[in-house]
Image (cartoon, rainbow, N blue to C red):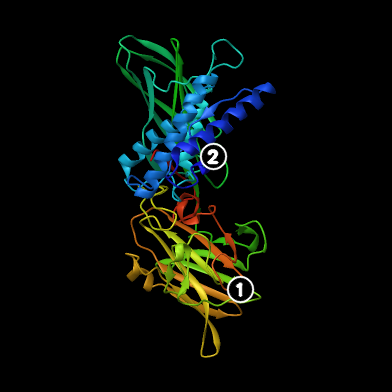
Amino acid sequence: VNDTSWSAAGAEAKAKTFVEHMSRIVDVARAKGIEVIFTRETHFSHSAAPDRWAFQISQTLEHLLRAADKLAAERNVPVIDVQGAYREAQAEAWLKDLKYEFTPDVIHPTQPGHAAMATELLRAMGVGLPLATAERGPLHLVRKAPVRLEALDAHGTVTETETITLNVRCRNFAPKPMKGDVMIVAGTCKATKPVSLTPNGMAMLEFQIPAETLTGRWACRPLYMAFTGDGVFTASHSPFYYSSIVNALKKAFTATTKDFRPYRGEGKQNCPVENVVVSFGRGGIDIEFKWADEKIVPAQKGFVGRFNKTIDAPLDLNERQGQPCDAIEFMFDFRPDKSRGRFTSNADSLPDGVVRVGAYRIEENGKMVTRLEPPAASPDKATIMSATFTDKGNGTFALHHPIRPGSSALGFSMRVTDTDEFGPGKGQIFYLTGRAHVSHEPMSYILLTKRTPGIFYRIGY
């Protein structure tokens, strides 16, 4: 996508250069005996309503891809249409929520977007067919097939000894009977079942995913499904999310400095926040921690943030590149289970139902004090303002946040900015969960509950 130069102008000239370079790649690769496959790139977008800027750049990208298709036909290079699979998945997600984001920063896909592309590569390469046999055949470049698979949406919680039920709908669009096998892969769990389909018929298959096979604290991965039989091979996917649950009523969640990971990869490698203890009590969530920063950089109002936007507050709580001063941000996912795990905001905002507050230092009357900043535009501001923040002395602080009913669990995360001088982008960012866009991966948050520990799962969008 960088070959568009991030502008809509000069599409013809850009396409000419693009094709020249792609042609050279084919020459060099084939001279060395390397097979070449083209894939179509994703596009520029935001939710179901891209702005004019993103739409116009996407038109330039489409021009480049059409030129690449022409080159592929001339040079006999196969093309895997990952963009087509990606857009089909987008359309399915938008049926559930028009705010669903596949590219929060306009271009880098979220995990559901990557899942759609990864599954199309798997399908095209015949993953599910026997290896090294004639049956595997060449690349499967046509996505449509008479048999189609669909995982039914589901969400809920199970204990670590229970299983997750996966229902797969298998449809035959051919006017003749079809017989074959359906394979599913979910994490490290793999299963295969036979299926017989009447002409234009349908069958429901039930698979069990043992919770004990779900490795790690959380994940979002493609649930891969493939049908083989009667000369037909097809595959599809559904996003499969899961997160382990901590019973915070029985045992407090704790984190040390080593649990916070640096984002930028350079500069400071040790987070100044330590001894984090998170628990339920007094009708809300309680967080106690020590802020052991050797050099304090206080906040200043009226700084200039991204895109030359003036922030008339100590912190910018929609900032994705860290704060200009020393700060600790707390993220709380109050969403109900029905929408937990959905990516529903761009990179400079927050999903509805996810609350973000920040702590900062500022000098008042010749003394350094610590304050809590709520997001000014939050619909939950009244609730947030009832949160209490206490300086317990010796660098130890406590935050109490009330909890509203409506969900079986609460997602929680922290992000720390540590800098030696005031200014946007000058500090190191440490995050407790997620990745660079910490607020957009709420499924990765520490999942706390007052109930039996286990697994929260989500199948589908």
| Mark 2 or 1, closer to the camera | 1
Q: Position of residue 135 (x, y in %)?
A: 54, 11
Q: Is residue 186 above or below residue 100?
A: above
Instruction: State the residue position of label 1.
Output: 421
Residue visible at 39% across and 39% down?
Answer: 59
Structural crowding at the residue carrying mark 1, measured as other residues with C-alpha within 10 Å and reported as few (<14), some (14–19) or many (≥20): some
| Total marks placed | 2
Residue visible at 52% across and 27% down?
Answer: 122
Helix, strand or loop for disc 2: loop
Q: Is residue 320 above or below residue 177?
A: below
Which amino acid does the dot numbered 2 rest on? Leu
For the residues labelled 2 and 1, the Cα–Cα distance comes to 43 Å
> In the image, is 445 to the left or to the right of 340?
right
> In the image, is 196 to the left or to the right of 300?
left
Q: In the rendering, which numbered label is found on residue 187?
A: none
Residue visible at 38% across and 38% down?
Answer: 90
Instruction: State the residue position of label 2.
Output: 214
Q: Earlier in the sequence, mark 2 or mark 1?
A: 2
19 or 292: which is nearer to us? Answer: 19
Q: Position of residue 212 (x, y in %)?
A: 54, 39
Is there CB contact under 8 Å for labels 2 and 1? no
Q: Position of residue 4 (x, y in %)?
A: 48, 42
Check the image and name the residue furthest to the bottom: 365
Can see residue 208? no
